[in-house]
């Protein structure tokens, strides 16, 4: 169970996206409507597979940013693994035709934000722990 918690959360939307494309029937599956939510305005909001994956990835991004606030040696490994996941997203975006769309680009940007936020939060917290202030720089 600790191994699953150590893996970056944004790995799961990447795996799910590729599984849906290659095991679930191709790219047309990504644009299929999963369900509709009626709104008070009378319009029914249609949720597609792509949209649901982006929403799930946003939840994972939130928890990844929370994970980046801890200061330990495990955080360094977590940042490295998040970087590898970002590289996986980037390679898929550039090399796999089914990943060349705006929804996957949003997932790619979330992976980039995860990497940048992780390093930024860790550096800021480490600076505070060491006691570096703006006067000494």
Image (tube, helix red, strand yellow):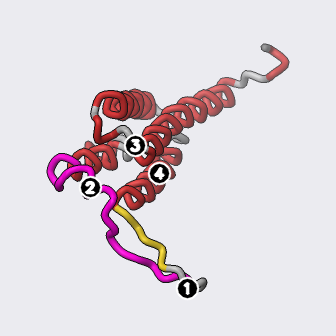
Residue displayed at 62% across by 33% down:
125
> Contact (CB < 8 A) between labels 1 and 3?
no
Which mark is on residue 101?
3
The 10 Å Cα crowd at callout 1, few under 14, some 14 to 19, many 20 or more, is: few
Q: How far across and how far down the image is residue 75, in percent?
A: 45, 34
Residue displayed at 52% across by 35% down:
118
> Contact (CB < 8 A) between labels 4 and 3?
no
Q: Nearer the viewer, residue 105 or 64?
A: 105
Q: Which residue lies furthest to the left in this view?
A: 23
Q: Name the residue under label 2.
A: 28
Q: What element carries label 3?
A: loop
Q: Is residue 65 left or right of residue 53?
A: right
Mark 1 and mark 3 lie on one chain; the one further toward the N terminus is: 1
Determine if the magenta segment contains residue 22. yes
Badge nearest the viewer, 4 or 3:
3
Q: Nearer the viewer, residue 135 or 106?
A: 106
Q: How far apart are marks 2 and 1 (CA)?
A: 27 Å
Badge nearest the viewer, 2 or 4:
2
Span colored in magenta: 21-39
Q: What element carries label 2?
A: helix
Q: Name the residue under label 1.
A: 42
Toward which corner of the image does residue 34 lie, by quadrant?
Answer: bottom left
Q: How far across and how far down the image is residue 29, in percent?
A: 25, 58
Q: What element carries label 1?
A: loop
Mark 2 and mark 4 lie on one chain; the one further toward the N terminus is: 2
Q: Distance between the residues labelled 1 and 4?
A: 34 Å
Residue displayed at 49% across by 34% down:
112
Q: Distance between the residues labelled 2 and 4?
A: 30 Å
Toward which corner of the image does residue 14 lie, by quadrant?
Answer: top left
Q: Distance between the residues labelled 4 and 3?
A: 25 Å
Badge nearest the viewer, 1 or 4:
1
């Amino acid at each position: 169970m600790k191994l699953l918690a150590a893996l970056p959360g944004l790995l799961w939307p990447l795996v799910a996206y590729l599984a849906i494309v290659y095991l679930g029937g191709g790219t047309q599956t990504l644009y299929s409507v999963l369900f509709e939510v009626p709104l008070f305005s009378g319009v029914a909001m249609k949720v597609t597979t792509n949209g649901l994956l982006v929403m799930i990835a946003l939840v994972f991004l939130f928890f990844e940013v929370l994970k980046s606030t801890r200061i330990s040696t495990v955080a360094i490994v977590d940042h490295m693994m998040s970087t590898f996941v970002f590289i996986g997203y980037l390679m898929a975006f550039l090399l796999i035709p089914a990943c060349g769309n705006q929804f996957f680009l949003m997932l790619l940007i979330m992976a980039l934000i995860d990497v940048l936020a992780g390093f930024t939060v860790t550096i800021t917290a480490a600076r505070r722990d060491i006691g570096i202030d703006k006067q000494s720089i």
